[in-house]
Amino acid sequence: MGVIQGIGVDVVDVKRMKIVLDARGTPLIKKLFTDPEIAYCTSKKKPHEHFAARFAAKEAVSKAMQTGWSGKFRWRDVEVINNPSGAPKVVLRDFVAEQLADCRVHISLSHTENTVVAFAIIEKND
């Protein structure tokens, strides 16, 4: 069993996310999300709910890292995919992958029509 290195939580207002995405459109979506995330979210009836969940997950991971927004953390370095069961899983890239090379990231997402909550735990491998 590993040691917990950090925890992070984030809450996103789904309606606010929709307003921001509608206003800023594709350039913002491409800045924040990977191509697989975009494909997944846009395949859903209410894409903004799924974008909000992935955004919250990225924020929760950044908080769990305890590094703040140093300029090296990029949104697309944390990708949220779903296991075949539907459970969310985090895929790390570039700077974030390097920083957490000896760690496992656990994520939990929950959302209603109005609110998304994401919780992340970073566990250092033995």
Image (cartoon, grey):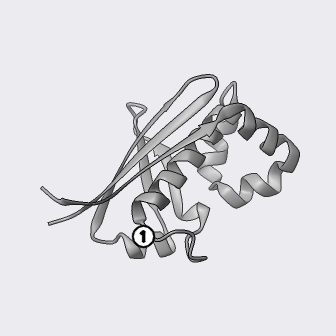
User: On screen, 113 above or below 6?
Assistant: above
**Residue 19, x across and y down, in percent:** 81, 38
Looking at the image, which residue is at 52% across and 68% down? 68
Callout 1 amino acid: Ala
User: Can residue 43 be spotted in the picture?
Assistant: no
Question: Within 10 Å of the Cα at label 1, are there few (<14), some (14-19), or many (20+) other Cα atoms?
Answer: some
Looking at the image, which residue is at 61% across and 76% down? 71
Would residue 14 be found to the left or right of residue 97 on screen? right
Looking at the image, which residue is at 20% across and 64% down? 125
Looking at the image, which residue is at 60% across and 49% down? 36
Residue on which disc 1 sits: 97
> Furthest-right residue in view?
23
Label 1 SS = helix
Question: Toward the viewer: 93 or 9?
Answer: 9
User: On screen, 117 above or below 35?
Assistant: above
Would residue 28 be found to the left or right of residue 95 on screen? right
Question: Toward the viewer: 31 or 81?
Answer: 31
User: Can residue 35 be spotted in the picture?
Assistant: yes
User: On screen, 27 above or below 87?
Assistant: below
- Image quadrant in which the N terminus is located: bottom left
**Residue 2, x across and y down, in percent:** 16, 59
Residue 52, quarter of the rendered image: top right
Question: Toward the viewer: 34 or 99?
Answer: 99
**Residue 22, x across and y down, in percent:** 84, 41
**Residue 124, x across and y down, in percent:** 24, 64
